[in-house]
Image: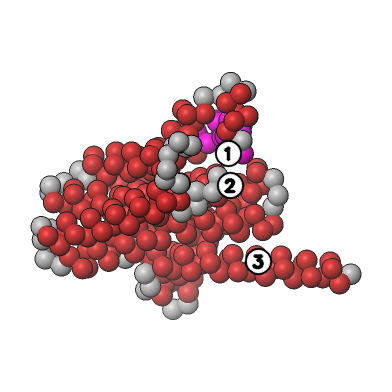
Amino acid sequence: MNIWSQLMMYLQYPFVRYALIVGTLISLCASLLGVILVLKRFSYIGDGLSHTAFGAMSVASILHLTDGRMILVLPATIAAAVLLLKQDRRSSVSGDAKIAMVSVSSLAVGYLLMNRFNVSSNVSADVCSTLFGATSILTLTRSEVWLCVILSAVAVILYILLYNRIFAVTFDESFAASSGLNVNALNLLIAVIIAVIVVLAMNLVGSLLISALIIFPAISAMQICSSFRSVSITAAILSVCSSLAGMIASILADTPVGSTIVAAQLAVFIVIYCFRKTLRRNKADA
């Protein structure tokens, strides 16, 4: 059986189609928001928020909220996003230090709680699955897929409608505020959308690898594009293509989904970076 026939066989199963749909939508949203975060120098916020979500999931498991864990996880992650993105010049703790503190403490407390209260017969396997997204993307239900479709559609629509305002806030908050824009409200909206995408992405790549979905497409696009619009569009295309390639490779080769997607995004970045270096060298020699 050749690769194409094997892929067509797998696509007959609903859970495979669900995984591809969710993976595409999450990658699209993460790439658009990733451009904003990279330019605002908050690239590592995905890691902090994912670890916050991990801690909240641990509490939800202790409270036996397995089916309704989003009720606890999403508000906790949104609160952390608002806290981390809030700019307070009077604070003695810098932005990157806050991210590191929230990230490490949430991860440690979450793992401690899961061990202390014995929420599962195999805590290590559950933790590994949550951190690396081992198989959760292949066990999505139809309701989870629809939830992802709706939330992703809302995120993309808001991004398009508020594009000019987001552009202004991303590059110069002071100028945006002087122009009459409600900077605090826009930052709050961005924080909420980021938190939602991070929580959804945990099913795709796991807590430890979410930052890759946010950072790699934006950084790769910045190697070949210069304007904000072109970087955003290119990042979205690269993210969707590399994520699809990673998921398909994972399904065909039976490798961990999250790690394979990250490897695909890394490969795309290396190719683009080397191409850019070669192009510059040839121009210098000419």
Residue 273: image tag: 3
Percent position (x, y) of residue 186?
Answer: 49, 31
Seen in the image, is 58 located left or right of residue 77? Answer: left
Q: Residue at x 28, y 64 (%)?
A: 129
Instruction: State the image coordinates of residue 266 (x, y, percent, origin top left).
Output: 53, 67
Q: Secondary structure at mark 3?
A: helix
Residue 247 x %, y %? 43, 64
User: Could you tell which of marks 3 and 2 lies nearer the N-terminus?
Assistant: 2
Three-letter residue code for mark 2: Leu
Q: Position of residue 132 (x, y in %)?
A: 34, 64
Please tell me whether residue 170 belongs to the stretch shown in magenta: yes
Q: CA distance from mark 2 to mark 1?
A: 7 Å
Q: Are marks 2 and 1 in contact (CB under 8 Å)?
A: yes
Q: Quadrant of the N terminus?
A: bottom left
In magenta, the rendered stretch is 158-171
Q: Quadrant of residue 173?
A: top right
Task: State left or right for residue 126 relative to residue 3.
Answer: left
- The label on residue 39 is 2
